[in-house]
Image (tube, rainbow, N blue to C red):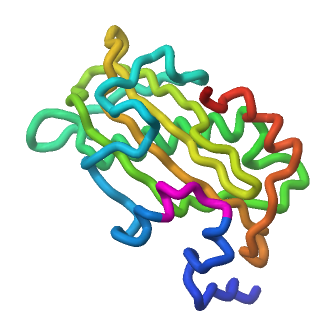
């Protein structure tokens, strides 16, 4: 089996960027794409002001002893893992990942996370998801993590996925099935 050919212009070539929101494009000009902390571009609301009622799909994740670092709280890198797990559960549940006959995949081209409060062990968190943007070939997911009894977020995160052909990696449009499967999660 021949290995897939890599895109010599890079994943962030102009063919991938023409459908992205301006906030992602401006961030790409000044960073490598992943930022920790700093000013929030998640929505008009500051990360510290995010509340449960702002999110439309939910799942629970329990911390493990192994998730904690030397400071006695869950390591920041683990937050990304939990957000990715929640997003993947949503995508499978809604049929935009691993759907029968699916020929496209979503590649993460940008992410950011703002850490607001520690999570420890043992603790179960609720992760809420909404869509910040539904483009013609990209989706920006906005996520927040809350302690079980907390109304204020422990962390907020954003992922932007661009959909490409699974074989050629050429950008493709989202199908109507994909759009309708998650359109109800678009924030107002």
Query: Which residue is farthest left?
Result: 71
Q: Is residue 130 left or right of residue 167?
A: left
Quarter holding the N terminus is bottom right
Whether 59 is drawn above or below 103: the answer is above
Q: Position of residue 49 (x, y in %)?
A: 33, 24
Tell me the quarter of the picture where residue 96 sits: top right
Tell me where the magenta segment starts and ends, as one range.
Answer: 19-25
Q: Position of residue 163 (x, y in %)?
A: 71, 60
Q: Position of residue 122 (x, y in %)?
A: 26, 21
Q: Which residue sits at x=42%, y=30%?
A: 144
Tell me the quarter of the picture where residue 74 sits: top left
- Viewer-side residue, 91 vs 181: 181
Quarter holding the C terminus is top right
- Viewer-side residue, 70 vs 115: 115
- Viewer-side residue, 134 vs 56: 134
Q: Is residue 20 left or right of residue 149?
A: right
Q: Which residue sits at x=44%, y=64%?
A: 26
Q: How many marks?
A: 0
Tell me the quarter of the picture where residue 17 sits: bottom right
Q: Which residue sits at x=74%, y=89%?
A: 2
Whether 169 is drawn above or below 137: the answer is below
Whether 19 is drawn above or below 114: the answer is below
């Amino acid at each position: 089996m021949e290995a897939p050919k890599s895109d010599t212009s890079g994943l962030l070539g102009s063919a991938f960027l023409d459908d992205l929101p301006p906030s992602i494009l401006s961030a790409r000009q000044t960073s490598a794409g992943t930022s920790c902390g700093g000013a929030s571009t998640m929505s008009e609301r500051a990360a510290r002001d995010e509340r449960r009622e702002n999110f439309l799909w939910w799942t629970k994740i329990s911390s493990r002893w192994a998730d904690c670092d030397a400071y006695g709280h869950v390591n920041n890198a683990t937050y990304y893992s939990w957000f990715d797990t929640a997003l993947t559960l949503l995508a499978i549940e809604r049929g935009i990942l691993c759907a029968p006959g699916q020929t496209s995949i979503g590649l993460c081209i940008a992410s950011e996370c703002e850490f607001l409060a520690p999570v420890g062990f043992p603790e179960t968190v609720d992760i809420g998801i909404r869509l910040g943007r539904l483009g013609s070939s990209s989706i920006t997911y906005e996520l927040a993590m809350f302690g079980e009894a907390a109304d204020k977020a422990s962390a907020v995160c954003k992922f932007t996925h661009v959909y490409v052909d699974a074989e050629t990696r050429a950008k493709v449009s989202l199908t109507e099935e994909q759009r309708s499967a998650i359109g109800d999660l678009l924030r107002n």
